[in-house]
């Protein structure tokens, strides 16, 4: 049975995943602690926590709030900064048998270019995920992902400063996600990932104030799955580059829905907080499904529902 997928066919380095399961940015930090709990090398790919030029302390507490079948977070891109990531984390990644992508975020286009340049040629880094979709920062982040022009400008800047495969991560907080997807494809994205979180909030009624320290947060988990699935379906039909899909995946059935909507790979992110083994259970479930259905190659399922 063939589970391997190529997610950067247009890039000279390429980026082949041994299976389509990705541990997404944010819920496993830099992956090193997670690797103590699970066999990280069984994953298709790992994406680091959002990384900026300088270290960021993140937003005030509280940063997490459970909602009906979802999670609101307002972490605000807390991270140790690119220099420390390259010096301390990349050497560990270089010992793994799984590609690691660094998720990058900047206040301006120049930051993204600098981050891409810094990562080029670093052992242990197999690609870059360009985060133009974080709803929890005052500058940069989602601002870029809600304008086709700005999204393309960031993509071009990253592309111009690295030969690494680049995946551009889109926000669902837009009117027409296909327009943004086409703009970043045109600007040179090797693949597109979606969705980041949906902006939301919660109110502490006793205190009569917003619950989260950052006031608003990003909604993830099963609550957003139908929205994410629709957006993946729409984007996969609008672009030719591979799509990595996610949002609320917790079971193999969820993952297969994303594959059939047109995703070449998918992630489990909030699901990892519920059960660290979730990505592996999902992988086993996908294999069971393929066996039951007599599917030899996962490629047969990619976009299988897309022409319906
Ligand atoms: C606590 C938390 C932190 C996150 N941090 C990042 C981040 O640093 N960069 C990023 O691109 N996405 C980040 N995300 C978004 C996830 O990668 C994912 O796009 C989103 O949560 C939807 O998928 P899910 O429902 O499977 O969690 C974060 C999500 C959560 C829950």
Image (tube, rainbow, N blue to C red):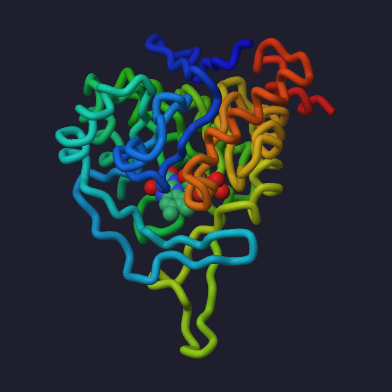
User: In this rendering, does residue 143 appear at all?
Assistant: no
Left or right: where does residue 296 sit relative to residue 51?
Answer: right
Relative to the observer, which residue lies in front, 221 or 193? 221
Counting from the top left corner in percent of width and height, residue 292 is at 77, 21
Q: How many marks?
A: 0
User: In this rendering, does residue 26 appear at all?
Assistant: yes
Counting from the top left corner in percent of width and height, residue 291 is at 72, 18
Residue at position x 42%, y 48% in the image: 27
Relative to the observer, which residue lies in front, 279 or 36? 36
Counting from the top left corner in percent of width and height, residue 73 is at 46, 61
Whether 289 is drawn above or below 33: the answer is above
Whether 189 is drawn above or below 29: the answer is above
Left or right: where does residue 152 sit relative to residue 105?
Answer: right
Residue at position x 27%, y 50% in the image: 79
Quadrant in which the C terminus is drawn: top right
Left or right: where does residue 210 sit relative to residue 99?
Answer: right
Residue at position x 47%, y 68% in the image: 216
Relative to the observer, which residue lies in front, 31 or 277? 277
Instruction: Name the quadrant containing residue 138.
Output: bottom left
Quadrant in which the N terminus is drawn: top right
Relative to the observer, which residue lies in front, 267 or 37? 37
Residue at position x 64%, y 45% in the image: 228
Counting from the top left corner in percent of width and height, residue 174 is at 59, 50
């Amino acid at each position: 049975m063939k589970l391997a997928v190529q997610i950067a066919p247009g890039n000279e380095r390429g980026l082949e995943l041994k299976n389509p399961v990705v541990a997404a940015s944010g819920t496993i930090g830099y992956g090193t602690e997670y690797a103590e709990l699970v066999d990280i090398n069984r994953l298709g790919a790992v994406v680091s926590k959002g990384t900026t030029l300088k270290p960021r302390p993140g937003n005030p507490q509280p940063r997490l709030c459970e909602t009906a079948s979802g999670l609101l977070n307002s972490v605000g891109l807390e991270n140790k900064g690119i220099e420390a990531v390259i010096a301390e984390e990349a050497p560990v990644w270089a010992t793994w048998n799984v590609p690691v992508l660094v998720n990058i975020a900047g206040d301006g286009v120049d930051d993204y270019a600098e981050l891409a340049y810094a990562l080029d040629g670093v052992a242990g880094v197999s690609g870059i995920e360009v985060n133009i979709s974080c709803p929890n920062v005052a500058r940069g982040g989602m601002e870029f992902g809600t304008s086709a022009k700005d999204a393309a400008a960031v993509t071009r800047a990253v592309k111009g400063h690295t030969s690494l495969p680049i995946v551009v991560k889109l926000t669902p907080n837009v009117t027409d996600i296909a327009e943004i997807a086409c703009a970043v494809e045109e600007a040179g994205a090797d693949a597109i990932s979606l969705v980041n979180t949906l902006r939301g909030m919660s109110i502490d009624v006793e205190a009569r104030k917003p619950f989260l320290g950052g006031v608003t947060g990003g909604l993830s988990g099963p609550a957003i799955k139908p929205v994410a699935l629709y957006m993946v379906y729409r984007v996969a039909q609008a672009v030719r580059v591979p799509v990595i899909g996610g949002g609320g995946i917790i079971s193999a059935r969820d993952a297969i829905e994303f594959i059939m909507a047109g995703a070449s790979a998918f992630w489990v992110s909030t699901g990892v907080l519920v059960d660290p083994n979730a990505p592996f259970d999902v992988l086993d479930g996908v294999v069971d499904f393929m066996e039951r259905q007599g599917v030899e190659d996962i490629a047969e399922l990619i976009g299988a529902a897309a022409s319906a």
